[in-house]
Every structure is written in C-alpha cells, then in structure tokens.
Amino acid sequence: MNEDSDLRRQLEPLRRIQAPEDFTARVITSCALDSHTPHRRPVGTYLRGAVRGLAAVLAVMLWTGRLDLSGPTEPDPAVTVAYNADEISAAWAELAWTINLTARVLDHSGSQTLRDIFDDRLPDAINRSLMSTFNANPKGNS
Amino acid sequence: MNNELQEFSTTVTAHQDPVYRLALATVRDADDAQDIAQEAFLRLWRKGRDVPPEAVRPWLLKVTHNLCLDHLRRRQRRHLRLGRPDPNALERLPEIRPDPPDGGLPDELVSALDELSPHARSLVVLHYCEDMKLAEIAHLLETTTGAVKVALHRARRTLQEALTPTRVMAGGNQETGT
C-alpha cells in the first residue's frame, strides 16, 4: 500500500501535465473546417459521370437515328466538294473510336488519367484523324 | 462560432488534459501527442451525439490509446524500413538542445517510463493519473480485469525499480535492496 502511494507521489509530475494552451482552439478550428467541408467525391468521379452521361446520350441518339456513326449514305454536297464518302466515313469511324477509347479509359481512371487524356491522347487522336484525312488528300477531291 | 461548436469547445476543454496526458505518456513526443489528441477529438466531433455525455471521457481515452498504439506501430515500421541508424550520428550533430519532447517531465521519470511498453505506459496513466479502477480500464481496453491487474503489477515493479533512489544515487555500485 505504501509502495503504491510512493509510486503515486513519484508520478505526480505526470498528473500535472496539461494540454498546450492553444489546444482547444486548434481542435475547434479543425472541427469547423471538417464540418464546412462536406465529404465530396473526387473531381474525377464527376467527370467520369459526365462522360458516362455523354456516352448514354450518344447511345440514345444513335439508337433513335439522330446520330449515324456509319456515315451518311448520301454525301453532303457541301462536304463532298472536298472529300469523298469513304474519307468521311473513315473520319466518323475515327471519331467513334476516339469517343469509345476516352469513355473506356475514363471509366478506369482518376484525375491523373483525365489530365493525360485531355492534354495528350484526345488531342493526339483528333489530330491524327484530321491529319490522316488531310494528308490523304490535301486539296480535297476538287 | 455556431452553438454546436461552442458546446463542443466546452467538452474539449473539460477532457483535453487527460487525453493529451495519455497520448504524451504513451508516444513520448509532444507534437505527436498533440496530433493524436486532436484526432481523437475530431473523431468525437464526427460522432456527434452518438456518444452520450457520461461516456465521452472513456470513449476519448479508448480512442486515444488505440491511436497511440497505431502511431507507434507505424513509426516502428518506418524505422524498420530505414534500417539501423548510424551509431556515431549523434556525435556529429551540432550542440543544439531541442525542446523537451516529453512536456518537461523530470529525467528520472522519463527514463523510468521508457522502460515500460507503450501499453503499460497507458495503463499506468489510466490508473495512477486518471484514477481509473482496474475494472474500468479492462472495460475500456476490452480485456479482463485479471490481465490489467497482472500488467499493472509488472509495470509498477519496473517503475519502482527504475525510480528507486538507491539505483540513481549508487550509479555503478547499485543495489536496490528490494
């Protein structure tokens, strides 16, 4: 019993330890910040959702016939001045491939990939598609 | 400040000392102890009214104890990854005395606490500083009263040996006489 009270006395400095003066303020600040910051989904999640939405809209348009990715059966006279039906069809196919690729990659990616897609891959794919069309026939069919 | 935060600040002020004390005695670093105590209160804040007022203190102490052990485990893993320290590194350091990491406890008490495991340090603080009964500690740490009793008995013996004046005064010619 005596030993116990001796030990209690020796541990007295430990009992006197107090939290730093600004501790309450620090805690309240972090709580205030915590309560004012709702648990948001990462930005990438919203963008992925937007791309999925876009893909759904495109699918509906395709299904209802408002979007024809196979290309026009009758060439548009305004376009065919410069390009033939095969070239336009190839460009549509490239565009469909690009959208498909983007949607698939975004589905498995975070913000890093989003940057990668929008900064490099998508512009490259579009650029490649356009360049291949232009290179094939720089002056069109005229 | 809204009413809820105002009310919560009263809770923080009422419980901050025991929570900080437990964290400091267990992790033995003032900055880490402050971070751990802050995290415990943040978790209480997120819990909202799920924790009844009479259960706040034991809840905080339990969370703090667990956070301390997690922190020490992580720190140990970090040290293991870094490998063995250079034994001569301290000699090469310039003569700068850092702030005491232990909140200014007497040296002999610091070295005595160092001889205990983190879990035993927690037990000592809960029993001797927060005056909790063995059954309360057992309930808090989800163990049996017997296990707490045994662990506390060992901790007490280690501390008494480390804190006994003969050992400190005798130096190389020590004899505890117990």
Image (cartoon, rainbow, N blue to C red):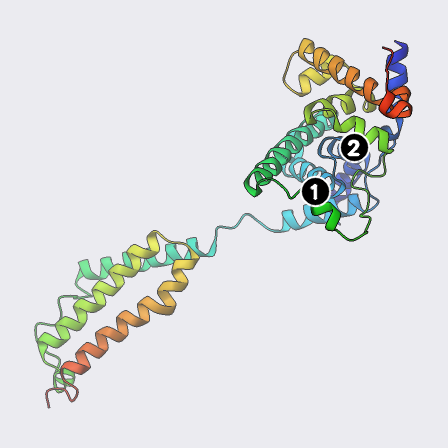
Q: Residue at x 20, y 68 (%)?
A: A94
Q: Residue at x 52, y 50 (%)?
A: A40
Q: Amino acid at mark 2?
A: Arg
Q: Amino acid at mark 1?
A: Asp
Q: Residues within 10 Å of mark 2 (few under 14, many from 20)?
A: many
Residue B84, disc: none
Residues marked 1 and 2 touching at CB (< 8 Å) = no
Q: Nearer the viewer, residue A12 or B163?
A: B163
Mark 1 and mark 2: span between their CA atoms?
12 Å
Q: Residue at x 32, y 66 (%)?
A: A121
Q: Are marks 1 and 2 on the same chain?
A: yes
Q: Secondary structure at mark 1?
A: helix
Q: Nearer the viewer, residue A68 or A65?
A: A68
Which x, y percent locates residue B158? Answer: 77, 18
Q: Is residue B2 visible?
A: no
Q: Chain of mark 1?
A: B
Is B79 situated left or right of A51 in this image?
right
Residue B35, disc: 1
Query: Outermost residue toward the front?
Result: B173
Is B35 situated left or right of B129 in this image?
left
Which x, y percent locates residue A38? Answer: 57, 49
Q: Is residue B175 above or below residue B79?
A: above
Q: Nearer the viewer, residue B89 or A61?
A: B89
Residue placed under numbered mark 2 in the picture:
B21
Q: Is residue A65 above or below residue B126?
A: below
Which x, y percent locates residue B76? Answer: 61, 35
Q: Residues within 10 Å of mark 1 (few under 14, many from 20)?
A: some
Residue B145 placement: quadrant? top right
Which x, y percent locates residue A132? Answer: 19, 77
Q: Quadrant of the C terminus of chain B?
A: top right
Q: Secondary structure at mark 2?
A: helix
